Image: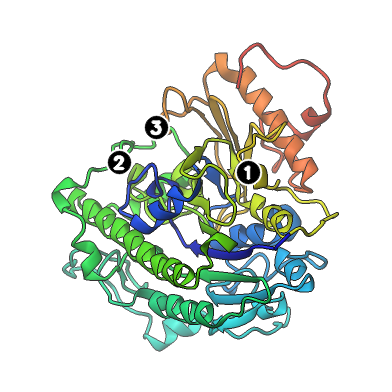
Amino acid sequence: MKRPNFLVFMTDHQRGDTQPPLGLAKTPNLERLFQNGVAFRQAYCPSPHCCPSRATFFSGLYPSEHGVWNNVDVPNTLSRGLYDGVRLFSEDLKENGYRMLFSGKWHVSAEEGPDSRGFELVYHKKTYQKRPNVPDTSEWELYKKAGGFGDTAGQTRREGEILRPYYPDYQQYGAKENPFGDTDVAEHACQALEQVGTDQPFFLFVGPLGPHDPYIPPQRFLDLYDPAEIPLPESFSDDMDDKPALYRRTRDRYAQLTPEEHRESIRRYLAFCSYEDWLFGQLLNVLEKRNLLEDTVVVYVSDHGDYVGAHRLWAKGLPCFQEAYHICSVVGYGGVKNPGRTEDALVSLADYAPTFLELAGIPCSRRMAGRSLAPFLRGEQPEGWRTRLFTQSNGNEVYGIQRAVFGGRYKYVFNAFDYDELYDLQEDPHETVNLIRRPDLQPVVKELCRELWKFAYENSDNIVNPYIMTALAPYGPGIAFSEEETGPARA
């Protein structure tokens, strides 16, 4: 049996509802993939940050087992790379005869690049080195060189600008012909596809940076969207008074923006998604020209989402709303049966590593948190598929530990830094009303705590310190091993 090629196009910050058939953004090439594949409508990342989610994609493990918790490149990072002994699917493919090609963003480790894990570098600028275990004050140089930046008092704010005294300037949106150099990433990837031989299976990973903030797509993609037709999110008026204070503090960073500027930000974000779709289309065109589409498993996926104005928030962070976790996930061509299907099973970014290995016919004996999606691609329904998904975040360098569990009617969020959250996703899909203090729903909280702690145990998540000042969950880890029955309410 001939082994398939793989093309993976991973965007940064792209929400799951921008993919077909949900169709919030105009993405004709992603629609083309959907018509020749399967769209997973309930796909989620484990963490709302690039590095831990990308490490999960490549390893099939959650952060608690691969060791990457936040941005590996900043001086106060919690970890600079993967735990010793963590293996990536790219190494398996390389050792089993695949030619591994990489263009674009890595962001898995600050100390080793994709070329340390089986890939040839098609286009990737960053260099890597081990750093001494001493205090790193390098980021202070940015402020020193700029003379501390300046006080914004009395300064006239420009459209889309957020004034921040003595911080660097921040412009929420704009327009640029080649934002973040993504055109270069795609062009080099296309050149690699033009030249790759057909006597050896290949795996090409393409990682653009868009639609990451600031939202600066080329003008021609902005012209696809009428500003008058851009609605504000359903949760835009949520004051978040019943939610953790950090959520409101984060939201307040965007308080300077008018509703019209929020709408324009949404327009720029959607246009950025359309630009990324156009780049993706260039790769599909090369595969088609070379008659490789039917021999290639094509994946369009994102590392995490973006609030895009939900709850008046932008980008991503600790607020545990679905917009930051819901990702794109469409797989097509390469032997997919009954194309043009949607699948509502709960899918994790951890599922891709075992999927690639199964499709390549490579046995894997090591444990992964994810499961192969191959049965769905064959038109089958695998037995015992998960009914819950879980999140893991230890914050974004400066703030707190958070875990969540969802699937079914209720979503529970454990916040070690503030009070918890409980949402009825059936009655309140936009997560505007926190029900955590409802006495009649405490059995639901208890049941979800049990599942959360059980998952933590199974995935080596050591957040079980019993000290009185840190053991703040309503039901402790011991509930995972308790045999008492849960309450009558269903979660």
Residue at position x 57%, y 18% from top? 441
Confirm or deny contact between disc 1 and disc 3 (CB under 8 A): no
Whether residue 248 can be seen here = yes
Whether residue 302 can be seen here = no
From the viewer's side, name the closer residue of 345 and 295.
295
Check disc 1 and give the amino acid type.
Arg
From the viewer's side, name the closer residue of 449 and 179.
179
Left/right of residue 63 with respect to residue 107 in the rendered view: right
Above or below, 184 relative to 334: below
Above or below, 224 relative to 118: above
Confirm or deny contact between disc 1 and disc 2 (CB under 8 A): no
Residue at position x 58%, y 74% from top? 73
* Residue under pointer 3: 432
Q: Quadrant of the N terminus?
A: bottom right
> Dot 3, how many residues are within 10 Å of its Cα: few (below 14), some (14-19), or many (20+)?
many
From the viewer's side, name the closer residue of 311 and 157.
311
Measured in 3D between alpha carbons, the distance from the residue under mark 3 to the one under mark 2, in whole angstroms, is: 12 Å
Q: Which mark is residue 337?
A: none
